[in-house]
């Protein structure tokens, strides 16, 4: 195992692979692929580093490393799994690979140094939650687990994404509490209101779309691109959210590295910028009364 891991790290670095779909470096990416290939837990590297391998298992694991280089597919697609904290989700190329700072506040225990934008004491009062642009359904599922008294609507425009989300919702046994809906943002939700709306919408700006690494171009473009400044979807969400939020409802939206553009576009809005593991400025939170009509 150690020999394969060293070989994988060297070859990944030589090939100039890009990361960000569950790992951030060659070592973690190679370890994840190898542990999965060999049937070992994904967070148990040290226990297996010196495990002997027969020729068949060695060759199969090496072939997976080579496939990562040849295809430039993120490990999550090669393994059909993604992890948010201790929670595993099925993924394939019909959906973006789950990665969200919002997930940090929904996973228990909370990540060190972070604080959720909602008061943990309100968990019992949060009865209706909306996850806009749900993709694989991961945030909707985490919200259902974090707020056990709540019903969750999980919305996406992509029928393919909703098929993946259905598999994940069923895997977690949450079919009675998580409703999947095909909708272009709020268009199919008339008459529904929510205590909490969370969204990790597309937010990649046009100039960045043109220079994405090959790994990111494996993901559905509609899950990434959001106009010239990366805020096309966020503009619609902010304009329409007041009709769908209860009077004390909370809107939480992830916008990546677009805070400067956001503040230029919405100079009068004063949202919270709760801290994440990467710092503040990647997710904003705003109460219904701050959004006006």
Image: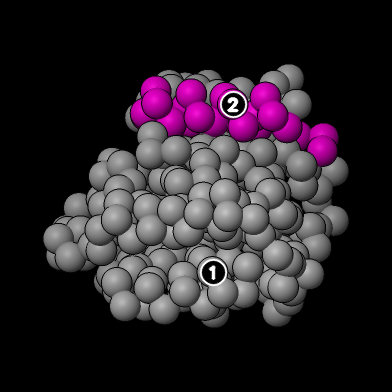
Residue 167 numbered mark, or none: 2
Tell me the distance, in whole angstroms, between the alpha carbons under discs 2 and 1: 33 Å
> Which residue sits at x=44%, y=53%?
63
Residue 106 on the magenta segment: no
> Which residue sits at x=62%, y=74%?
2
Image quarter where the N terminus lies is: bottom right
- Which of the 4 image quadrants contains residue 212? bottom left
Residue 242 numbered mark, or none: none
Question: For the magenta stretch, what is the residue range?
Answer: 148-172
Tag 1 or tag 2, which sits nearer the N-term?
1
Q: Above or below — where is 284 with respect to 46?
A: above
Q: Residue 45, position in %: x, y? A: 70, 69
Q: How are the residues colored?
A: one colour
Residue 168 on the magenta segment: yes
Image quarter where the C terminus lies is: top left
> Which residue sits at x=20%, y=53%?
227
Q: Which residue is mark 1?
A: 4
- Which of the 4 image quadrants contains residue 74? bottom left
**Residue 242 in view here:** no
Q: Residue 79, position in %: x, y? A: 52, 46
């Amino acid at each position: 195992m150690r020999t394969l891991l060293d070989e994988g790290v060297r070859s990944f670095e030589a090939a100039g692979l890009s990361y960000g779909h569950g790992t951030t470096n060659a070592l973690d990416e190679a370890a994840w692929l190898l542990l999965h290939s060999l049937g070992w837990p994904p967070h148990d590297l040290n226990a297996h580093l010196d495990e002997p391998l027969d020729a068949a298992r060695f060759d199969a694991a090496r072939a997976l490393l080579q496939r990562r280089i040849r295809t430039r597919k993120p490990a999550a697609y090669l393994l059909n799994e993604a992890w948010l904290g201790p929670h595993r989700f099925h993924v394939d190329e019909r959906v973006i690979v789950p990665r969200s700072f919002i997930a940090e506040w929904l996973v228990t225990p909370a990540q060190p140094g972070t604080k959720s934008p909602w008061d943990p004491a309100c968990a019992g009062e949060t009865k209706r939650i909306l996850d806009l642009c749900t993709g694989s359904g991961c945030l909707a599922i985490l919200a259902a687990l974090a707020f056990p008294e709540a019903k969750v609507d999980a919305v996406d425009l992509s029928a393919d994404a909703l098929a993946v989300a259905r598999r994940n919702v069923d895997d977690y046994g949450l079919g009675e509490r998580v409703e999947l809906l095909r909708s272009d943002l709020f268009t199919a939700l008339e008459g529904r209101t929510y205590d909490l709306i969370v969204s990790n919408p597309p937010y990649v700006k046009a100039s960045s779309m043109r220079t994405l690494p090959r790994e990111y171009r494996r993901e559905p473009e509609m899950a990434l691109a959001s106009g010239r400044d990366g805020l096309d979807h966020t503009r619609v969400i902010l304009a329409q959210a007041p009709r769908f939020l209860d009077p004390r409802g909370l809107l939480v939206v992830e916008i990546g590295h677009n805070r400067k553009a956001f503040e230029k576009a919405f100079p009068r809005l004063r949202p919270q910028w709760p801290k994440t593991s990467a710092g503040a400025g990647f997710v904003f939170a705003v109460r219904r009364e701050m959004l006006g009509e």
